[in-house]
Amino acid sequence: MKDLTSLQDQTLALGGVLQACRTVHEIAQLGMTSNDQLVSAIDTIFVINPKETIEVYGEIKNVFQGLDLLSDLLEDWSAVPKSAPARTAATIILLERRLQRSALMINDIREGIAFIADERERLSLTTGSPEITRQLSMIYKKTISQISPKIIIKGQPKNLSIGVNTERIRSLLLAGVRSAVLWRQVGGVALDLLFNREKILRCCEELKKLE
């Protein structure tokens, strides 16, 4: 695969944010999601120092649904307020900006992820296992969840009352923050969504053709 352009990197990372948020709301509404979606999103949390943006996601196809959602939203701005994943993604991007003000909280998150990564390897745990999502959920709850505004996920009460679902949701929100960090690092800014809308739309299509 040829090297991605700067705007393609930004588009991929933003697709990653939306992919995680879409999966969050799928669990909240349906009580389930595919294991592949869950694992590919959570795996991004453990890619700490990638040489290229694509390394975070493994394969572009792992972000296809996020890219599709991004395309839909850019084509119809009126759909943004109606889209729960889009609203959650916007809040995640805001929280990530505020997270950067707290070096202590960032360090706590890094240390927590490093510990879980070691445990995952030592115990041969899969990324989507209840033990991993439980520990990642606790990191989110102790750190990002303490920043305002808090993310409120609405869904079917019976689904949100199941412990493993809430742990998966928090883990996925953490994955969303990870992609938001990446988006900022590769030069993503909110104004690009307005002024480079057509270019980002083209990037969404170009990325899917690269796979």
Image (tube, helix red, strand yellow):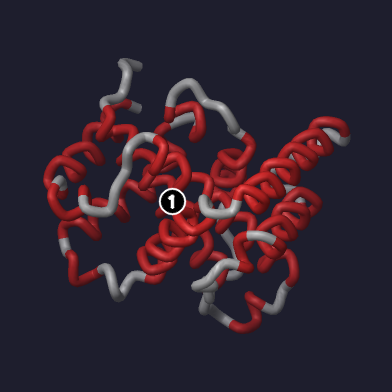
Quadrant position of residue 122: top right
| Mark 1 burial class by Cα count in 10 Å: few <14, some 14-19, many 20+ | many
Q: Residue at x 64, y 36 (%)?
A: 46
Tell which residue pokes out farthest to the bottom in this image: 157
What is the x, y in percent for residue 66?
Answer: 38, 50
What is the x, y in percent for residue 102?
Answer: 59, 53
Q: Residue at x 74, y 37 (%)?
A: 114
Quadrant position of residue 183: top left
Q: Tell me the quarter of the image containing the N terminus.
A: top left
Residue 176 visible in the picture: yes
Q: Residue at x 41, y 37 (%)?
A: 185
Tell which residue pokes out farthest to the top in this image: 2
Seen in the picture, residue 34 relative to 82 is either above or below; the reply is: above
In the image, 57 versus 13, the foreground residue is 13
Please indicate whether residue 168 sits to the left or right of residue 156 in the image: right
Q: Report the amino acid beneath label 1.
A: Val
Q: Residue at x 62, y 66 (%)?
A: 145
What is the x, y in percent for residue 30?
Answer: 54, 70
Q: How many marks?
A: 1
Tell which residue pokes out farthest to the right in this image: 123
- Per the image, label 1 sits on a secondary structure element best described as helix
Where is mark 1, residue-wise? Answer: 17
In the image, 68 versus 182, the foreground residue is 182
Seen in the picture, residue 100 relative to 91 is either above or below; the reply is: above
Please indicate whether residue 20 sits to the left or right of residue 168 in the image: left
